[in-house]
Amino acid sequence: MVSRSRKAFTLVELLVVIAIIGVLMGLLLPAVQAARSAARKSVCQNHLKQCAVGIEQYIAAHDGQIPPGGFEYQYLMKGGKNFAWSMYILPYIEQGTLYQQISQDHAFNAEQNAEAAKMVIPVYLCPELAKAESVVGGMGQTHYGAVSGTTLPEKTKSGDMNGAMIFTGTPIKNSFGRVTGQSEPLTYSDVTDGMGFTLFLAEDARSNEHYAYGDRAWISANNVFEVAHCVNRGPADDNEIHSLHTGGAHAAFGDASVRFLGENLSREVLGAMITRDFGDLGAYSF
């Protein structure tokens, strides 16, 4: 009887197989990473969309009044309560119970609001920063901020509040420095450039070490900012339109639409998107 022996792989053959597997992994890994990145980008877009719809519903429930970007902003009003838009829209993003826990008679960082302020609201977070701490300084974070205005390219009307999400409840002073009243909320009729052509919210998403206390807390008006730089071009320690997505960042407009703004967007076009009543609607189109 003839015995048959089974031939084993030689070392060379084994190395060839390992090399082929390595090449296939090298080809597949970028595709897998790209797919995961696209999925995170889609989730981020959906989160910002929910915030924009929350603003839209707030406007409908308040007779056309736009929510404050920030109320009694402490940099403009000593001892102000410093509440943010992201606090005011809580009832419209299925966070009504949390909203009821907040004492609006006290400041955002008062002891009475400590428990509410530390709550994490998933819809306010971009999944690209999943590894970042969602609670900083005892306060739940947001990766989306309201835009109060812009200096792009050199917008001067209304100072730093030429956008839609302005600071309200702060003193208005005349040329002699005397307080003559308080800044009031805008209504949709004030946005004469058109709600669908005026930017309300944008990503402000970078690692936490670049931000000061409260600058990205959802309860705090410190997450509201004036845009002075192009997309993903601002300094690391300043609130600006920025994301970890490749090539740009998401922004929400007054009609609750969400668009991805590319890094190559010009200063003129970005400025036109932000201002509410400059009549520069023709500067861009979607």
Image (cartoon, grey):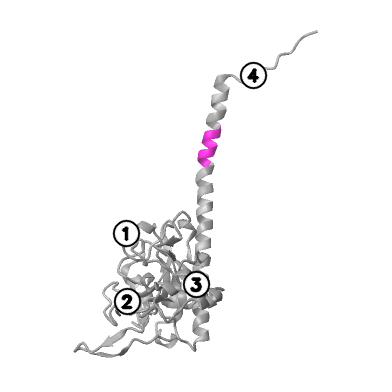
As drawn, the residue found furthest toward the right would be: 1
Q: CA distance from mark 3 to mark 2?
A: 24 Å
Whether pointer 1 and pointer 4 mark residues with C-beta atoms closer than 8 Å, the reply is no
Residue 82, placed above or below residue 15? below
Residue 22: in magenta span = yes
In the picture, measured across the screen, residue 76 lies left or right of residue 127, that is: left
3 or 2: mark nearer the eye: 2
Whichever of callouts 4 and 2 sits on the residue coming sooner in the sequence is 4
Residue 11 shows in this picture: yes
Q: Which residue is mark 4?
A: 8
Q: Amino acid at mark 4?
A: Ala
Which element type, helix, strand or loop, lies under badge 3?
A: helix
The residue mark sitting in front, 4 or 2, is 2
- Residue ID at (38%, 74%): 221
In the rendered view, tell whether residue 76 sits above or below residue 4: below
For label 2, the residue is 74
